[in-house]
Amino acid sequence: MTLVASWLAFPALLVVLALGWGLLVERAAGMPLPGALLPPLGLASIMVAVQLTTYSSSTASLSTPLVVLVAAVGVAVGARRRRLDPFAAGTAAAVFCVFAAPVVLSGKATFAGYIKLDDTATWLALTEHVLTHGREVSGLAPSSHQATLAFYLNQGYPVGSLLPLGASRPLVGQDLAWLFQPYLATLAAMLALSLYALLRPLVRARGIRSLSAFIASQPALLYGYTLWGGVKELATAYLLALLTAIVPATLPVPRGARGLLPLALSSAAILATLNISGAVWLLPALLGAAVAVVRLQRRNGEPGFRPAHVAAFCALAAVLSLPSLATASAFRKANSVLTDPSDLQNLLRPLRTIQLGGIWPSEDFRDPPGALGLTYLLVLAVVTGAALGLVWAYQRRSWGPVLYVGAALTGWATTAYFGSPWVDAKALATASPALLLAGMVGASGLWVAGRRLGVLLAAAITAGVLWSNALAYHDVSLAPRDRLSELQRIGERIGGQGPTLMTEYEPYGVRYFLRDADPEGASDLRFRPVQLRTGRPLTKGAFADLDRFDLSAILAYRTLVLRKSPTESRPPAPYRLVQQGKYYEVWQRPTAGRSVVLSHLPLGDRVQPGAVPPCPDVRRLAQTAEAGQAVLAAVPRARPVVALPARSPHPRGWRADPVNPPLLYPRQGGSVHLEFQVGTRGRYAVWLGGSFGRGFDVSLDGKPMQAARFELNNEGQYVRLGQVTLGRGTHTAVLRYKHGDLRPGTSDRLRPLGPLVLAPLRSADTVSRLAPREAGRLCGTRLDWIEVVRR
C-alpha cells in the first residue's frame, strides 16, 4: 500500500468505526448529542469494549469482529439523521495534518520518536499481544519480548489508549508499526472535535470556534510528546476534553441510567488509559460537574440532584471499568516509584510550569527556548486571554470550558505535588490544551465585544503555537523505515528458530519485530545474563562487538541477528550465514551435531576487527587442540582503512574527539576533509559511523557516494554508503553536512559522526581449519579470532 493510501485509509476506517459506535451510544442513551462528539465518544467506547474482551485470552480474538459489528449497526440505525458540520470536520482534518506532517512530508510511512524514547517498541509489543492473547504471558518462551510484556502486564499497566489501534489493524493488513503515527494523528483529531464541541454553547461563530479548537489542540508540549510516541498523554488530553464536553449535554436533565451512559463510557475510558491514576483527572471533572448541575437546577427551580443518579452512574462506570479496577492494586504497588522526586527518566531536568501555557519555541521541549523573553510574553498573552475567557464563560453561564480548565489544572497540580518530575512532565502535556483553549476563548470574547485587541491576542497565541511546533517538526527523529522493514521480514522468516540474540541496542527488534523467534537484546530487558568477558553485562542502550562477550553467553543462542558493520567480528565457528540483507546478517548454528568450541581467542579492537596473534598464544591454543583431539579454526581479516582529518582547524563549530580521533562533532552545516592510505588495490565498501537525520554527503577523490538521510542509529553502528575501487596510495574524502531545509528532521541538532571506514570486500563466512601441527601458519597472519573446535 502506498504512503498516501496507508495514511488515509486507516484513519478514515478508524473514524467510520468510531462514528458507528458513537451513533449507537447516542441511540442507547436516548438523547441527542452534538455531532462533533460522536466520533470521540465512539472511539472511547471502543477502548472500553476492547479492554473488556482482551482481559481474557479466550475472548481477545473477538475484539475486531465486535468492533466492526457494533459500528455497522450504529451506522445503520443512526447515520441518516445526521448532517456533517464542515467546520468540525475541517478542524479535525487540519489538526490531523499538523500531527501527521513530520512523517508524511518525509516521504516514508514510518513513525516518530526513534532513539529519543524507546517506549513505542513496547506499545507495539503490548498491542499485538493483548489483541491476540489477552493479558496472559505465562506461555511465552524467555526473551526480551516476554520480559517486556511480563514487566508491564503483570503490574496492571493500562493499555486502553492502544486498543483501538490493535482492534482495527487487521482490517487494513498493515503492520502496527506503520499505523502507529496515523493513529496518534487521529487521536489529535479527536481532541480537536472534543474542544470544538466544548466551545459550541459559548462561541457561536463556527469559524472562530474552529480556529480556537485548532490552536488549542496542538500545545507545544503535547505536540512534542506526540513526536516521542506519547500515546497516553494525547489520549488522556482528548478524553478529558470529551468528558467535560459531554457533561453539559447529559447531567442537567438526567434520564436514568441510560442517559448517563456517555458519561460513564468517557470515565471508564480515562481509567482504561491511566488505570487508577486517572482518578486525578476524573474526580475533579465529575465533582465540578456535580456542583455546576446542582447550582443550575436550583437557579431554575428544578429538583436537586438525585442520589439515585450518582448511584446509577457509579454502578455503570464500575461495570465498564472492571479490568481497570481488577488491576488497580497491582498497578499502584508496582508504580510507587513514580513518586520519586529524583526520577527524571529521559528528561534533562524538571520541566518548567510555564510550559503549561502551550508555547515553547524550542526544537526539544526539554531545552529552554533561544528567545526566552519573547516566550514569556507570548505565554503571558495566553494567561491573560485565559483569564478573560473564563470570566466571559462564567458570565455567559457556559460552564463547560470552566469545568475543563478547572479539571485540567487540578489534575496537573495534584500530579505535580505527588509525582516525580517525569510524571509531572506528562501531566503538563496532558493539561496544556486547557489554557490555550481558554486563551483563544478570551480573544474571541474581545472580538465579539468589538475590540480589536482580540485579533491581536489571537494572532499572538496562534503565532507562538505554530512557531513552537515548526521547531519541533524540524527536529523530529524518524524511524528508519527500510531497516525496520528488513527486521520485520527477518522476524517472519526465523519465527520458531530461537532463541535469538541481537548485540546492537534495537528495542524494536527484540521487543516486537523478532518476537516469534524468542529474541533477546544484549543491552535490553532479557532473561539470560548476556555477559561480557569481564563478567559484567552491558548497560541499557550500549553496544559491544561479539568478541567482547563471554563465549558461553553467545553459544546459548541458536540464531544471531547482527547489524552489518566493517568492524563486527564473525560469529563463532559453529554458526553459518543463512540470510544477508542490506542492514542485517542472520547466523544460525545447528540444533544437533554441532561443533564444540573449547577455547576462543579474540583479536582486534573497537575499530580494527582483527590483529596479528602473538605466536605464544597460537602455540598454547595448538596444545589445547591436540590435547582435546580438536582442530584450530581461524578467520582471516584484512585491515580496514580508517580515514582521519587531513588538516585543522575543522569547519567552524566542528570539533574532534580527543579520546577517539576518528569521531567528529559537527555543530552546523559544513564540510571536513579526510585522508587515508590504501596499501592494496581492490574493491572497498565505504562505511560511515553515526546517526543522520539531515542529509549528509560523502565524496571520495571527488566522486560522490550515496547520501545518508533519515539513518538514525543507536550506539556503535554504521551506514553503508556504497563500494568503490581504489588503487594504492593516498586518497581524500570530503564529509559535508548540508544546511537545514524545510523537511522534517533536518534541524541543526547534529550528532557525532565517524569514523569513515573503508573495508575490503570479503566473504562473510570464511573459516580456515587447521590441524594443531599447522598452527605455525597462523603466526604473522591478520585474523579476526582463533578457536579450538571439536566436532
Image (cartoon, rainbow, N blue to C red):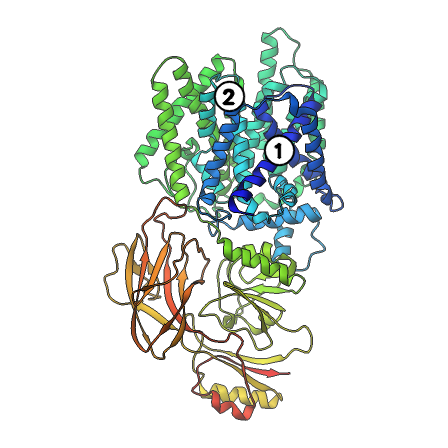
- Inspect this view and state whether residue 774 appears: yes
* 781 is higher (above) or lower (below) than 712: below
Left or right: 197, with 371 as reference point: right
Report which residue position mark 2 lands on.
Answer: 199
Q: Amino acid at mark 2?
A: Leu
Q: What's the residue at 63%, 69% (across, down)?
A: 558
Figure label count: 2
Disc 2, SS: helix
The quarter of the rendered structure image containing the C terminus is: bottom right
Q: For the residue labelled by badge 1, is the local secondary structure a helix, a strand or a loop?
A: helix
The part of the image, by quadrant, that contains residue 290 is: top right
Q: Note whether 677 is above or below 138 in the view shown.
A: below
The percent coordinates of residue 478 (x first, y second) are 46, 49
- Say which quarter of the image contains residue 666: bottom left
In primary-sequence order, the first of circles 1 and 2 is 1
On screen, 627 above or below 66? below
Residue 261 visible: no
Residue 711 x %, y %: 44, 56
Coordinates of residue 297 in the picture (x, y in percent): 61, 11
Q: Which residue is mark 1?
A: 16
Q: Residue extending furthest bottom?
A: 773
| Left or right of residue 530, residue 641 in this image | left
For disc 1, the neighbor class at 10 Å (few under 14, some 14 to 19, many from 20) is: some
Residue ID at (41%, 14%): 448
Horizontal side of residue 653 vs 9, given as left or right:
left
Q: What amino acid is found at the position of numbered circle 1 in the picture?
A: Val
Front one among 780 and 178: 178
- Tell whether 485 sits left or right of 592: left
